[in-house]
Amino acid sequence: MRLINRRPARPTAVLLAALPFVAVMVAYWVGSEIRLAANPADKLLPAPETVATTARRLFTEGDRRSGEILLWSDTWASLRRLGIGVGIAAALSTIIGVAIGMLPYARRTLSDFVAVLSMVPPLALLPILFIVFGLGEASKVVLIVVGITPFIIRDLSQRVLDIPHEEIVKAQTLGASTAVIALRVVLPKILPRLIASVRLSLGAAWLFLIAAEAVAAESGLGYRIFLVRRYLAMDIILTYVIWITLLAFLIDWALKTLSRRAFPWLEAGL
């Protein structure tokens, strides 16, 4: 049997999925042991048990001054900004993507503009956003919107263009207006792709959020990481990085589950 046709059994698949994570953990543990053996005061690669102890403290112990558990308040602040930014980006992308894909006038007007906008490095716009929107919540949300919206628009507009023209013609033959075609024919077709595009954009959204929080914020996961970096508190930084990674994975898993349950026909067609 050719290798391309061989599929691992369930236990083997689980083992193969866990293998890279185990390899990274082992590599970190070996590197930490080597550095700490040479210098017990080394802060670059703290021992895994040190990171675990720090994580337990950050998740359970309140701040000495306020009594608030900072990790949870930082998590809420970051997730709120991320949710608002991604939500606005998804709504704008759906409207503009459908318009570009369906309407020749909109396509001629906006297609090239969105393509050029997608080439602009969003982080280069950060100083401008701070000047225009201030250092509050708005600038951080806008950075996420500006950063991921053009990509999602281009993806959705192409998905609209890929819809068989016969379906559009049949809807028109039955008397459907442009708005009805958009709502009853086009929108159901692109919703699965919207979820997929949002999933693909989450990594960039987190990047823009962390960058904005690092520059100007009083709370948030990115703010806390850059606050403690001056003390070389790698145990705290690693805890926050692992926590951000876990949050990103859970959000991606939730979107994947939503797509599978809302559009079972999509999975069946694969």
Image (cartoon, rainbow, N blue to C red):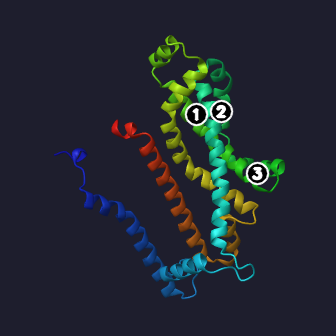
Characterize the local packing of mark 2: few (<14), some (14-19) or many (20 or more) Cα atoms within 10 angstroms: some
Judged left or right of residue 182, residue 142 is right
Question: Residue 24, can we see it?
Answer: yes
In primary-sequence order, the first of circles 1 and 3 is 3
Image mark for residue 154: 1
- Residue at the (53%, 78%) spot, across then down: 51
Mark 3 sits on what residue?
138
| Disc 3 element | helix
Image mark for residue 114: 2
Give how far apart the Cα atoms at labels 2 and 1 are.
7 Å
- Residue at the (72%, 47%) spot, across then down: 142
Q: Which quadrant is the C terminus positioned in?
A: top left
Characterize the local packing of mark 3: few (<14), some (14-19) or many (20 or more) Cα atoms within 10 angstroms: some
The x, y position of residue 65, in whole percent, is 75, 81
The amino acid pointed to by label 1 is Arg
Q: Nearer the viewer, mark 3 or mark 2?
A: 3
- Residue at the (70%, 66%) spot, across then down: 223
Give how far apart the Cα atoms at labels 1 and 3 are.
24 Å
Foreground pick, 237 / 33: 237
Judged left or right of residue 55, residue 215 is right
Image mark for residue 268: none
> Mark 2–mark 1 contact, CB under 8 Å?
yes
